[in-house]
Image: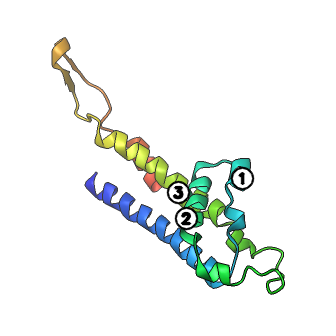
Amino acid sequence: MRRRGLALLEAEQLANAADITGAMTLDALKGTPVAFDEKIQDVRPHAGQRESARRLRTLIEGSEIRASHRDPAVDLRVQDAYTLRCMPQVHGARCVMPLAHVRQILEVEINSATDNPLVFAEAGEVLSEGTSMANPLRWRLTMRL
């Protein structure tokens, strides 16, 4: 279980790195964070998408590069490339949401009893069961994210 927890932490760090890299790419290409606007995220409110958009907005906030090219007479683009505009949808669906689901399962597993049989001393009962099967976690970890 310890290895799985560490793997989850590493994967969450990679998801954060994806947003950081995305924000840096947007900045380097003199893109606009308009596609990350909260109103846009409210229209299709997937939790991972919203979280990724929030992180991207925070990361690009106060960018001097962005401020340097906001003159509409200089920058005549209507919108940024699709790959830049879709970062919250891609990062949210492929990274943030699946990792949040794995975290939820892992937290339940780490804080659960998996002995067989289970001894309920206060009730004077010893019950045989199948909680030692880690299927929820196993199935999530073996699925392609």
Q: What residue would you read off at disc 3?
A: 96
Left or right placement of residue 36 versus residue 23 in this view? right
Marks 1 and 3, the one that precedes in the sequence: 1
Q: Give residue 141's quadrant in the image.
A: bottom left
The kind of residue on which mark 3 rests is: Val
Q: Secondary structure at mark 3?
A: helix
Nearest to N terminus: mark 3 or mark 2: 2
- Residue 145 in view in this figure: no
Q: Which is closer to the viewer, label 1 or label 3?
A: 1
Q: Pinpoint residue 20: horizontal percent, then vertical percent.
A: 51, 72
Frontmost residue, 20 versus 114 = 20
Q: Which residue is mark 2?
A: 58
- Neighbourhood count class around disc 2 (C-alpha, 10 Å): few under 14, some 14–19, many 20 upward: few
State which quadrant residue 142 falls in: bottom left
- Look at the numbered discs 2 and 1 and tell me whether their residues touch, using CB distance below 8 Å: no
Residue at the location (33% across, 41% down)? 109
